[in-house]
Image (tube, rainbow, N blue to C red):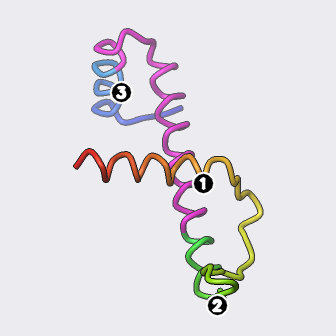
Amino acid sequence: MNLPPQVQENIKKWASSQGISTEQFILQAITEKIAALSQQKLEEETQLNLNQATLYRKDGILVVDAELPANFDINTFIDELREERIQDQIV
């Protein structure tokens, strides 16, 4: 991979400070970027689905009728809600 010299120096510096090789640093950086983009896409898809959602009450419960994203994981969703609730209680 041809990178500008200044970028190469920064990679070496940061990899060294973290005690990893430059290859590991680059792989980690790429992996983090892919994860961030995937999360962004998921949030955009979720927002689109919410815009197409139907809200109504059934037996006193608020129901959101919407199509879930293909990669929606209910366990992850519940864990994130729990984490938000914990953070809200801390603050």
Q: CA distance from mark 3 to mark 2?
A: 56 Å
Residue 22 at x, y = what percent? 44, 18
Dot 3 amino acid type = Gln
Mark 1 secondary-structure assignment: helix
Residue drawn at 67 percent across, 48 percent down: 75
Q: Residue at horizontal 62%, vertical 48%?
A: 76
Q: Are marks 3 and 2 in contact (CB under 8 Å)?
A: no
Report the disc number at residue 62: none
Q: Is residue 4 above or below residue 50?
A: above
The span shown in magenta is 15-43
Say which residue label 1 marks: 77
Secondary structure of residue under mark 2: strand
Taking 18 as reference, is 49 left or right?
right
Three-letter residue code for mark 2: Tyr
Q: Nearer the viewer, residue 73 or 90?
A: 90
Is 76 above or below relative to 9? below
Please count the marks in the image: 3
- Residue 51 is covered by the magenta coloring: no
Mark 1 or mark 2, earlier in chain: 2
Quarter of image, res 15:
top left
Q: Position of residue 31 (x, y in %)?
A: 55, 36
Query: CA separation, marks 1 and 3?
Result: 38 Å
Where residue 62 sits: x, y (%)?
60, 81
Residue wearing tag 3: 8
In this rendering, the label closer to the viewer, 1 or 2:
2
- Give the residue displayed 56% in from the left and 46% down from the top: 79
Residue 56 numbered mark, or none:
2
Q: Which residue is found at the position 65% from the left and 79% from the top?
A: 49
